[in-house]
Amino acid sequence: MNTAEAEGGLWLVACLCAAWCRTCDAYTPTFEQLEREFAPRVRFVPVDIEDHEDALGELDVVDFPTLLIAEGDTIHFLGPVLPHAQTARQLIERALKGQLLPVRDAALVGLAGRIGALRVG
């Protein structure tokens, strides 16, 4: 069992972007740096919203980058962020410390699991 499992669940941070988005292109090195900082406690998944629209279900992503932070099937954050490492770092740290309340929205049920099941790279 790894550390994340011992602490209650597998953590996921997904960056929802689009291939045509230049802000997303610029955010990629930041997302990769965050992955290095938080591994192995957190799994990071870059998600192209057009390539993986089935996994997104009814979710309509209109602002980029959009982050999803989840523990297992429980989403703790889902929304656009400023494309700065410190913004995402603070959100991730707060989620890991249990400082973010779960997002309660019936339309999002299963979203974290579908995104977590993606094999991207």
Image: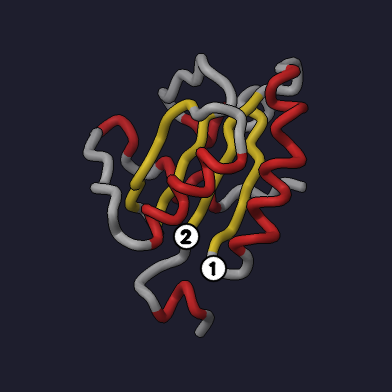
Reading the image, the residue beneath label 1 is 41
What's the residue type where badge 2 is placed? Trp
Look at 49% across and 45% down and name the residue there: 114
Look at 63% across and 27% down and name the residue there: 17
Q: CA distance from mark 2 to mark 1?
A: 7 Å
**Viewer-nearest residue: 37 or 118:** 37
Reading the image, the residue beneath label 2 is 11
What is the x, y in percent for residue 28? 74, 37
Look at 47% across and 40% down and name the residue there: 68
Mark 2 / mark 1, whichever is N-terminal: 2
Q: How many marks?
A: 2
Asked if residue 114 is positioned above or below residue 41 in the image, the reply reads: above
Asked if residue 57 is positioned above or below residue 99 in the image, the reply reads: above
Secondary-structure class at tag 2: strand
Left or right of 63 on screen, residue 100: left
- Does the residue at mark 2 contact the one at mark 1 (Cβ under 8 Å)? yes
**Viewer-nearest residue: 13 or 38:** 38
